[in-house]
Structure formats: structure tokens, C-alpha cells
Amino acid sequence: MNTTIRRTGVFCLLLVLALLVRATWVQAYQARALADDKHNRRKTIAQYAQPLGDIIVAGKPVTGSKKTTGGDLAYRRTYTEGALYSAVTGYSSQAFGTTQLEGIYGPVLDGTDDRLKNPLDALTGKQAAPGDVLTTIDRDVQKAAYEALGGYKGAAVAIDPRTGRILAMVSTPSYDPSTISGATDGDAWKKLLNDPDKPLVNRALRQPLAPGSTFKLVVAAAALEDGLYRSVDERTDSPNPYPLPGTSRDLKNENPSAPCENATLRTALQYSCNNVFGKIAVDLGQDKIRAMAEKFGFNTEKLDVPVRAFKSVYPSGMDKAQTALSGIGQFEVTATPVQIAMVSAALANGGELAAPHMVSKVTDADGDTLQEFADGDTERVVSKSTAEQLRSAMVTVVEEGTGSNARIAGAEVGGKTGTAQNGVDNSRTPYAWFTAYAKDRAAGKEVAVAVVVEDSGAARSEVSGNGLAAPVAQKMMKAALAR
């Protein structure tokens, strides 16, 4: 055989082999990646080829599907009271993707999840009937939070302390996901993106802010657990004002006439004494405060409820003055509302933190369970004695101190206010915080909440945790105890 012909034949054979190897590689190893690629139009067509499964609140769907006219996307997502539940559902948009529960459980809701397929579906490639997502949200608590926040920029979370079930999750200003669920909703999308109040941001989970004096509960817990003070009624060693170590500045209190000098932890929480908690933070040291904060959930990279919350931060590498400021929830301490609600929930539950979650189960089209989330999966954060003492002090805050707007007749209510500085030298409007728990022992009901108001439009002098955030918390807790 001619040498040239032989070489050409071998070269052609190699080309064929290379083509076979490439085809095998694509089909065997890259098929899933290509199928899941966001630019793959077939994936979007399959996603909206049939009515989507539903997200369920209290036994009723808060989502739906609507037949489209024209185009290759057969159905689009609809929402019932979309603005009320947007912080829970997120959105499912033909043009802009999915978020929140819509995103996490997208394959279940559109019928492409392998767990939904029977053996025949697997052989034929037929798309299975979609499943549903059952949430832990209580409609009455959710509605109470949403209506109470009203026109405020803020967020609210309610948790059942015993089970970890999230009963409410609200972020305001909100939006109706139905307005961006289609393929031609670009104008509505741009309006939301350009809104300076950022309604697409879930402030309850993904907007960590300085927690201010609500963080004093964590510092008080550290002081009791460490043995720095044996009781919330033991007098502390706390000069007023407290000189910040290594500086010429004093840590002062908002109320100069408050009895904060050498105050007990109970009195210090009642009057929100900065000098006491700044001094405690320095006396304990940042490592012990951080260890306690991390038991409550701070510095956790993967807090999934199942939507992932942004990390709440207690910093490291501080000097003593910065450590003192961290003791009052300032400097570089940040927290999300769900994190602060977890603090109150753990104290309400005798020192045990139940893992927070807002999905109870995921089912197939027949209602059979695909995935279930257990209630009451707890970890001990503080001793039962510490939790009892801090609850007692929190009750004093509500009954005799700065949290009077959270009172509920016939219920045990304990709370903590916070007014957190915002901006360089507190140049911007402060954040108003309130966290609390409420128990109706006769009915066996309880709830823990956290509320933050970033901006209410009120004058700076009128911003306070008790004035703005506590009334929201009170309405949520009343709804929870009545459910």
C-alpha cells in the first residue's frame, strides 16, 4: 500500500476515534452540566411546560400557574398575595430565574426532580407530575408582621422556640413576584432593580446590620455562663460613664439619669446601660464573647432555613476599646433578624436552640413525602439556669423598662430593645430593633420574634426600639399565641 494513503487512512481513523471519544464524553459526563446550564433554552421550556407545583402555607397554596398565549413557554407562575409572602416564596421568572424556595425546590416544583419519576418515566424520559413544598409559615402571624411593618423599611421573623418552625418571615418594602414572572416583564424588573429601597432583598435573612443593644443578651449570657456574675441581681463593677481603654473617650448611656453605675444585669438590661456591657465585654475578653455568640449562631457560614442566611458576625482582632463597643452590639458586630430571633428563641426554650426552618416537608404529586424536616432538633447554648435568669430580666424590660410597647395581657412577655448607630459617627438614621419571647402557659403556646426597622421616615429623635419595633413584635406575638 502506498505510504501516503496508509498515513492518510490512519489519520482519518484517529479523527473518527477522537470524534467518538468527544461524543462519549459529552453524553456521559457533560450531559447534566449542559442540561442545567442557564443558557439552555430546553431547560426553561421544560420548567414551564406544565403547571408548576405549589408552595403551601397553612394547607393552602400561595402560588399557582397560568396558561400563556403564544411562545414556547406553556405556563407562567402566579402568586396569591404575592407581596405578603415574597420573602418566603421568592420568585419564579421565565426571564430572570428563580430565588428563595422557588429556586431551592425548582426541580420538585417543575417535575424534573429524579425522585418524582417512576421507572417508566425514567425509561421514556417523560416529565413527571410536579411536587409541592409545605412551609411552616402561619398566615395570621405573617399577616400581622406585614401589616404592622406597613410602610417601614425593615424585617420581622417569628420562630416557635420549641420546634424551630419559622412562623413568619417578612421583608419590607415588598413586591409582587407575579409582576416579573413572565418573559416580557423587563420594565417591572428594571423598576425593582432601580428602587433605592431594594425590595428584592430579603432583609430578614440577607441584610445583616448592627444589632445594637439586642446583642447585650449575648453578653449577659456570657457573663453568667463564665461565672463573672452569678446572678442577674448581683451588682456589677461598672463605672458610669465607662472610660474606653486606651482612649480619651467615655462610653456613655442614652439616658444620663438611668441608675447604671455598678448596676445589676437586670437593671442594666432594663435601662440598656452601655457602661455595664462595655465593661463586661472587656472583662471577659473578646474570645469568650465570640464563643458565646457562635453558640447562638453568629459566624456560621451555612445557616440554611433552607434559604441561606447571610452570616451574622462577631469580629476578631479587636483592641479593648473596640471590644467594649462590640459589647453593646456596635463596632463591626452585625446580625440578621433571623439570628436575633434565634437568641430569644434559645432563651425561651430553656437554653436550647432548635434549628430554625421554614419548610416542614416536600411531597410528590400524590402527597407522598420526598423530604421531611424534623422539629425540635436542638443544641444547648446556655444552661437552664442562665436562660431562666435572662428571661426574668427580659420580663423586667417589658414590665418596667424600655420594652413597654410589647406587653400582652395575660401572657408572659420578655424582650430587649436596641437602637443601633448607623453611619460614620452615627451620621445616619439609627436602626430600631426589638427582640422578645411570649408564653401563654395556660394554652401551652409560645413564640420568639425579632424586628428591625431600618427606616420609618420618622425624625431621628423619634427612633427607638420600643417606639418603632416593639409594636410590630407585639402584634406578631399576639397572633402567634392566638393561633
Image: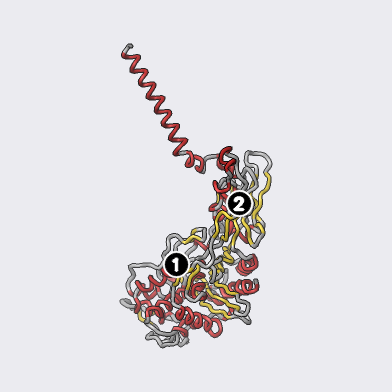
Residue at screen point 35% across, 81% down: 243
Residue at screen point 46% across, 76% down: 217
User: Which sits in the foreground, 100 or 322?
Assistant: 100
Callout 2 amino acid: Asp
- Is tag 2's residue or tag 1's residue first in the polypeptide sequence? 1
- Quadrant into which the N terminus falls: top left
Q: Which mark is residue 364?
A: 2
Callout 1 amino acid: Gly
User: Which sits in the foreground, 468 or 39?
Assistant: 39
Q: Which quadrant would residue 468 be assigned to in this image?
A: bottom right
- The answer to whether any part of residue 201 appears in the image is yes
* Residue sitting farthest toward the top: 2
- The answer to whether any part of residue 429 appears in the image is no
Residue at screen point 47% across, 84% down: 266
In the image, which is nearer the foreground, mark 2 or mark 1?
2
Residue 470 rendering spot, x and y as whole percentages = 57, 75
Is 278 situated above or below 89? below
Q: Which mark is residue 427?
A: none
Is 127 situated above or below 326? above
- Residue that carries the numbered disc 1 in the rendered image: 297
